[in-house]
Image: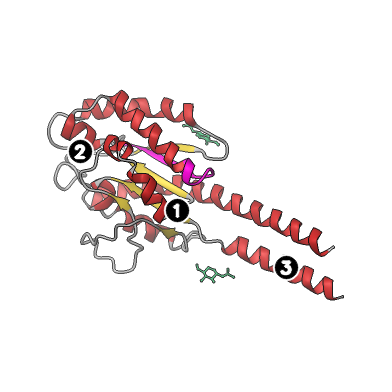
């Protein structure tokens, strides 16, 4: 009798933990992830769903006049940073050590192109390093990579399009069942002039467009990450049952 009671309590506890297991999501990138309001819009869009308790994580908490006191501001957006530098300096390694994640979004490459006219092949190489870091931190990391938004200043969009064109093939080559990479297109339908407030960073219309593109991709990623946790809890439960029996 006693062992029966123990068994059902253990099973119940595992089931509750699995359902409740808080997912951690890191928005990762440059200023287009840091000093924007798409994170606020994305967080708010999630509040009417089963994903409302997803914990946004990262070392940054900058307020960006989003007129939103409620949203989870934690993020790993670093204004002015190049993908190539983040990869070479192994910065993401430390960021993920401090704030581990189940799901990560990456919008990077703009500064590599604008500041230093880096070759697309070298940016892609940095992306490969960064995905390696994500998977070292969490072999089951669910990864969403953006084809980046156009700019409304300078002459950078052909290079941006060149990078964007390389991303899907690159992502396919690195795709893994345990740690899928999903590519989202933040370029198409986004106007570098009308949807940016300063030629580079989205205005309200641009933030809305970006949040709407991220949304289905992060939800798919949350579903996959939750499935992992439910499976892990079921495994733990099996072990407990064995132990009690
Ligand atoms: C459920 O998650 C919340 C945080 O989101 C935590 O405070 C609470 O203790 C958790 N409950 C269980 C039963 O794991
Ligand atoms: C990676 O695999 C997942 C399925 O696990 C698929 O949904 C996704 O589209 C693939 N990514 C790429 C870039 O092909």
Q: Is mark 1 within 8 Å of ligand 1?
A: no
Q: Position of residue 171 (x, y in %)?
A: 44, 30
**Left or right of 64, for residue 48:** right
Q: Which residue is mark 2?
A: 192
- Image quadrant of ligand 1? bottom right
Residue 213 visible? The answer is no
Residue at coordinates 19% horizontally, 45% vertically from top-left? 196
Q: Are marks 2 and 3 in contact (CB under 8 Å)?
A: no
Q: Which residue is mark 3?
A: 10
Label 3 Cα neighbours within 10 Å, binned few <14 / some 14-19 / many ≥20: some
Q: Are marks 2 and 1 in contact (CB under 8 Å)?
A: no
Give the residues drawn in magenta, as a range. 135-147
**Left or right of 142, for residue 61:** left
Vertical order, 92 against 117 (above or below): below
Dot 2 or dot 1, earlier in sequence:
1
CA–CA distance in space, label 2 to label 3: 55 Å
Label 2 Cα neighbours within 10 Å, binned few <14 / some 14-19 / many ≥20: many
Quarter assignment of residue 191: top left
Label 1 Cα neighbours within 10 Å, binned few <14 / some 14-19 / many ≥20: many
Q: Which residue is mark 1?
A: 100
Vertical order, 70 against 46 (above or below): below
In this view, the mark in front (2 or 1): 1
Residue 42 visible? The answer is yes
In this view, the mark in front (2 or 3): 3
Residue at coordinates 34% horizontally, 32% vertically from top-left? 126
Quarter assignment of residue 133: top left
Dot 1 or dot 3, earlier in sequence:
3
């Amino acid at each position: 009798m006693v062992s029966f009671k123990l068994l059902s309590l253990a099973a119940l506890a595992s089931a509750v933990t699995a359902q409740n297991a808080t997912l951690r999501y890191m928005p990762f990138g440059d200023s287009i992830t840091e000093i924007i309001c798409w994170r606020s819009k994305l967080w708010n869009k999630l509040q009417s769903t089963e994903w409302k308790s997803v914990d946004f994580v990262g070392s940054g908490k900058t307020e960006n006049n989003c007129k939103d006191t409620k949203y989870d501001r934690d993020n790993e957006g670093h204004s002015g940073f190049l993908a190539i530098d983040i990869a070479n300096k192994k910065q993401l390694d430390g960021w993920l050590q401090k704030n581990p994640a189940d799901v990560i979004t990456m919008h990077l490459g703009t500064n590599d192109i604008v500041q230093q006219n880096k070759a697309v092949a070298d940016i892609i190489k940095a992306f490969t390093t960064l995905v390696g870091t994500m998977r070292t931190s969490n072999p089951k990391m669910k990864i969403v990579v953006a084809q980046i938004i156009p700019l409304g200043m300078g002459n950078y969009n052909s290079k941006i399009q060149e990078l964007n064109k390389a991303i899907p093939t690159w992502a396919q080559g690195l795709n893994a069942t345990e740690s899928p990479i999903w590519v989202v297109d933040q370029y198409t339908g986004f106007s570098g002039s009308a949807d940016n407030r300063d030629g580079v960073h989205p205005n309200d219309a641009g933030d809305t467009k970006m949040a709407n593109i991220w949304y289905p991709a992060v939800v798919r990623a949350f579903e996959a990450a939750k499935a992992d946790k439910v499976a892990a809890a079921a495994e733990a439960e099996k072990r407990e049952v064995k132990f009690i029996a």
